[in-house]
Image (spheres, coloured by chain):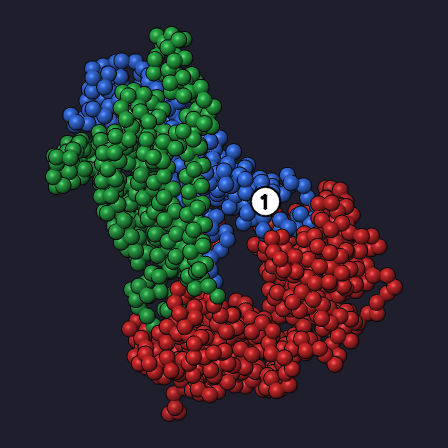
Amino acid sequence: MHPIFKLIAQRVALGIMLLFAASVLIFGGTMMLPGDVAQQILGQSATPENLANLRESMGLNDPPVARYFQWLGGFLQGDLGTALTNGRDIAESLGSRLGNTLFLAFWAAVISVPLAIFLGLLAVRYKDRWPDKLISAVTLTTISIPEFMIGYVLIYWISIKAGWFSSVAIINDSMSLGAKLNAIAIPVMVLTLVVLAHMMRMTRAAILNVMQSAYIETAELKGMGMLKIIAKHAFPNAIAPIVNVVMLNLAYLVVGVVVVEVVFAYPGMGQYLVDHVAKRDVPVVQACGLIFAAVYIGLNLIADIVAILANPRLRHPK
Amino acid sequence: MAVEPLLKVRDLKIGATIYPPGERPRDIEIVHGVSFDLEGGKVLGLIGESGAGKSTIGLAAMAYGRGGVEITGGEVHVSGRDILKSGLRDVRKLRGGEVTYVSQSAAASFNPAKKIMEQVTEAAIFQGKFSKQDAEARAVALFAKLGLPDPENIGDRYPHQVSGGQLQRCMTALALCPEPDLVVFDEPTTALDVTTQIEVLAAIKDAIRDTGVAALYITHDLAVVAQVSDHIMVLQQGSMVEYGTTDQIINNPQEEYTQALVSVRSIKHEEKKPGDTPLLKVDHITARYRGTNFDVLKDVNVELHPGQTLAIVGESGSGKSTLARVITGLLPPSDGQITFDGRVLSPDLPTRSLEDLRELQMIYQMADTAMNPRQTVGTIIGRPLEFYFGLKGKDKQTRIQELLDQIELGDGFQDRYPAELSGGQKQRVCIARALAAKPKLIICDEVTSALDPLVADGILKLLLKLQKDEDVSFLFITHDLATVRAIADSIAVMFQGQVVRYGPKSQVLAPPFDDYTDLLLSSVPEMKLGWLEDVLANRKMESAGN
Amino acid sequence: MKNIPISAMIGLFFTALYFLMALFAPLIAPYGMAEVVGDVWEPSSSEFLLGTDSIGRDLLTRLIYGGRTTIFIATMATILSFTLGSILGFFAAVSGGWVDQAISRFVDLIMSIPSLIFALVVLSVMPTTTTILILLMGLLDSTRVYRLARAVAVDITVMDYVEAARLRGEKFAWIIFREILPNALSPLVAEMGLRFIFMVLFISTLSFLGLGVQPPLADWGGIVKENKEGINYGIQAALYPAYAIATLCISINLVADWILNRTTSLKGGRG
């Protein structure tokens, strides 16, 4: 078998192990609760008898390890448990919300990824001249403002002052795609601005790094023009670092979504998570946390695999 | 009017922007008005130490400035056109078509993501000189001419799949493929091992002769350039010192600087007879790095006598530096022991006594990284005094100054930082730091390899003087046999982790030789014309690394 | 000091200004922090320079006190994350072997979960007090400092001068404090600026989500939360903290950029 498959298999196994460890961490993190879930549900009026019964029925008297495996086992079969606050099935509530979140993240990615790569190339092409400096100044500014504030600034100027688009992004299944897109226009802009800055800066650095290699000089000394050099010699070597940048930023996007959803009252996973953190609804928090972690680990895994596949030393061993 | 030469350079001035730490960037001139001619089919050697501006001049023949370098004045005519006044379009036609370039590091200059053939033929096709088919046929012919194995198929490999010496030949094929008028060779053999260098050198020389191309051959090694060039230009700090035929420069140099370059490595050192008891005894040492299953050192036995120098000679990968790590305790051996001054040394550094540590000092190849950039010379030399002898205040100052005098640096150096010193001065400070411990043995790991020849000579002379004054022993690790001749009393030749030849200098360097020692000895370029042909005619063994 | 570029100068000026405001908030602020002095969302006037907030407190006063809270928490968390991260990073780099492996893998694990998500999970069961917030942010962020400190220190420990010190018989402390630390300081200080920015953004975000600083205490993220409804009526109150955070973060970025550039030029470029 080609040794590269072995490397990829190893990397995937590592990713799964990491996800497993992360689930332990998330489960363990919520065990630090002072008091317990039963107390939480029944509130101050609970009698010791009620508490004991509920604990028994929820399996809270089992040792933590057993409860962990029970939780994980359920999770793997799609049973995420029930929410403490309203007793509803978590998987059911999550389903449509996860779809909404991915819908939002998808459109943000569709706009920001090509734009970031284009701007990164532009900044490299005009390095240290005004287009580069302008791009770097603008991105420095957006990096320095938290997502939610960009959100309100845009709502204020675009939605309220100029009267374009809606300041809340409420969507439902009965809406047409056009209506949905109109509703999420400003949130997508916010997310784009936020990841664009990071992604563009990292793309610029990655391409510059490649452009400083000696083989680029060799190409220059062959009399090739800049665009041709970038296309033929820089690009094949820049794929891996750029994919890495894109994946890292998509992972970042996943986190950005949480806050942006709250700002725009968007019915996604992020808002669901934040609501239930405030209500101390532990099962919901655990489920959402693990899903976010899985997406994050998965994206990083893809980046690593692309890097392995793009490396000529690994693809063509001696 | 006479026929125009292929390359005519007049009053070439080149500037660069430098960025001194903590100061504003400023422009300096690095080449000050150099002029020369090169006729078609001839080879001109550009020789000089680092900072002489030789690479910069070579690239100017392609109207190219590397990094922040810019051509600020003068004329460069190629086939009668001033290329500095040509537009970018014409310059691009010239680069890769009429003038091509071979760099020092082929490994970095090849694109790792593309096959060798595609890169070798790229310029020839791109510049419209040959069709793809013709260019590939030409490349295969060049591969064969340059002595590459399997010339038909080597082009299908990726750069990382061939060795350094082979890649350097591929780079030469890349430069010759478009049938240029002029090739700029920028230190093409410097990064190679000595036994590989000579073969690549011979291949380049044949290729130049057979294709009738003109060449600018840039190197710091006069002995190398003497083998390939018709004329030589000696450069120093951006100015021409001397220009003449190769014969005249080598056999009858006019300028003082050229004379110094020619006579470099001519230190005479009388071999000392070994005493009764050795200071250092390396006894059946076998070693491997952790996590590997390969012995880097196999049953090594050598001795070093007080006040003498033992040279460990070998190419990269021979295990010579590993031996130093074993002796210093950085790498405990898997078998064997080290006896030092009559006592057995603990194999592991942390368990050695302070006395053992003090008496065994080390000097490194790169003086740059051997000194903490945030410490002054005074601190660097003063620390061993404080650490081993508890010297403080005035006593310490006096002793530091004594040491500085000993290494011929004098006053005013105590408060300087390493960045403010030249390469030779840095290495002298490292020597002073080792001396400060009053050691019995100093391990010198390639201490002159990174230095220009004249500076290296100065360091070797200093080491010999110190040995006489302080009666200190040296374990001298090097790949350079000229250095060995200059300094050693006994020699151990290492090859693939084993000592293949060991004894007093006079014996080791006298025939009959084993195959490897013969190869190694014969590969050291000598400063005489026709040496390359003589050597290759009398070889016993193919190059070791290739 | 004569070689500081203008951008860094501006950065230094605003950074100093904000820290001084935070330090002397009670002296500068025109009113009391939680004092209701006017009507809801009054426009700016000579009495209330930036107007009043959603329950009639002076917005400028809220902003000054809010800056005090935000900067205090961010500073404490940065100090914690820096001390812990760099000590562990250096320790791992110098120790090498399994110690390094164990710490590094654990840090990898923590970093495999996004900080904000991790913080939310922990805050779902912990009370949101200032101490807990500082501890949580500092600990989570120390993983990033650890990575940088370790990488920088590993680069330095392979230098010959560190080996020379080992061969001389120097102790652990000398090697860390005299050989490694002086050479690692500049990149770490530049990173400190970036970590501080991250902390400001982090605590603001948590407060905005209602999981950070609790009322009536003011902080910049909290002020946005309190006044966000005003946006829909065209009232800018919620935007002022945005401007404050942006100027502070940009200023620190400019200073950090300058420090980093100074360090890289020390190493010298190509050629």
Q: Specify the chain shown as red.
A: B
Give the image quarter of residue C93: top right
Viewer can see residue A316: yes
Position of residue A252 measured from the top left corner of the image (x, y, whole percent): 33, 40
Position of residue B179 measured from the top left corner of the image (x, y, whole percent): 38, 83
Residue at coordinates 74% horizontally, 81% vertically from top-left? B512
- Of C127 and C257, which appears nearest the observer? C127
Task: Give above or below for A186 relative to B5.
Answer: above
Quadrant placement of the N terminus of chain A: bottom left
- Of B156 and C60, which appears nearest the observer? B156
Q: Which residue is mark 1?
A: C96
Q: Specify the chain shown as green.
A: A
**Tell me, what hue is chain C?**
blue
Viewer can see residue B425: no
Position of residue C40 measured from the top left corner of the image (x, y, whole percent): 20, 17
- Dot 1: chain letter: C
Numbered circles on residues, count = 1
Residue at coordinates 63% horizontally, 43% vertically from top-left? C175
Position of residue A56 measured from the top left corner of the image (x, y, whole percent): 40, 17
**Mark 1 residue element:** loop
- Of B460 and A241, which appears nearest the observer? A241
Residue at coordinates 43% horizontally, 49% vertically from top-left? A11
